[in-house]
């Protein structure tokens, strides 16, 4: 697995700990990686400054907050111009229910992941999308069960 050349084993161990629980005190992280608190803090600050740690967030329980339905939306478009892509980005980026957006290779041009309360909430977003940009095909699938969900990436430690 390729890793940035300037990351050593200690950096990777810090990253593994922080991606599992970003609320840990620096002292706790330092103890786990056998560093002084100051040395650990400097490494974390460097990892943040270098963009390796992009941000620290809390992962919320979607279902308990009224967004328990996961929808995957596959979009095809007949148009592939810069103007269309700009309009698409302007249409989808501000919609908070859309958690992830990918431009794809293969049969599907774009893949979106949404978390909504129910089918009616999804339908409102669907109508908003088809009003905003011309789409050739929209195919939506609904998750019946979440078997695994993580934000942690595999690290070679």
Image (cartoon, grey):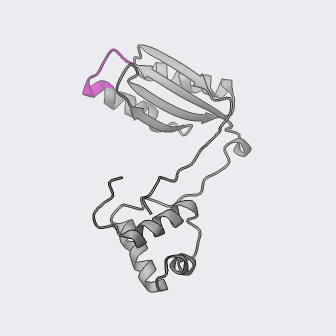
Number of numbered discs: 0
Q: Which residues are magenta?
A: 77-84
Compared with 18, 35 (above or below) is below
Residue 23 falls in image quadrant: bottom right
Front-lying residue, 72 or 8:
8
Image coords of residue 68 (percent x, y):
69, 37
User: Residue, x 54% and y 76% (percent of image)?
Assistant: 32
Image coords of residue 24 (percent x, y):
58, 71
User: Residue, x 47% and y 19% (percent of image)?
Assistant: 131
Front-lying residue, 141 or 85:
141
Compared with 49, 69 (above or below) is above
Residue 39 falls in image quadrant: bottom left
On screen, residue 62 versus residue 99, left or right, reads right
On screen, residue 29 versus residue 3, left or right, reads right
Compared with 135, 49 (above or below) is below
> Quarter of the image containing the C terminus?
bottom left
Q: Is residue 8 magenta?
A: no
Image coords of residue 150 (percent x, y):
56, 48
Front-lying residue, 83 or 35:
35
Q: Main secondary structure of the magenta part?
A: loop
Image coords of residue 7 (percent x, y):
34, 67
User: Residue, x 30% and y 60% (percent of image)?
Assistant: 4
User: Residue, x 52% and y 60% (percent of image)?
Assistant: 19
């Amino acid at each position: 697995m390729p890793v940035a050349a300037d990351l050593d084993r200690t950096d990777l161990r810090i990253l593994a700990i922080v991606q599992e629980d970003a609320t840990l005190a620096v002292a706790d992280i330092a103890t786990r990686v056998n560093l002084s608190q100051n040395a650990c803090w400097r490494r974390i600050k460097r990892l943040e400054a270098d963009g390796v740690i992009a941000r620290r967030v809390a992962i919320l329980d979607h279902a308990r907050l009224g967004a328990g339905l996961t929808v995957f939306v596959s979009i095809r478009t007949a148009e592939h111009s810069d103007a269309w892509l700009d309009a698409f980005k302007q249409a989808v980026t501000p919609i908070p229910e859309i958690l992830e957006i990918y431009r794809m290779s293969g049969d599907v041009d774009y893949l979106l992941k949404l978390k909504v309360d129910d089918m009616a909430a999804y339908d409102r977003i669907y109508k908003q999308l088809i009003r905003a940009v011309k789409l050739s095909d929209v195919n939506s699938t609904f998750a019946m069960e979440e078997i695994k969900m993580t934000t942690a990436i595999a690290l070679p430690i």
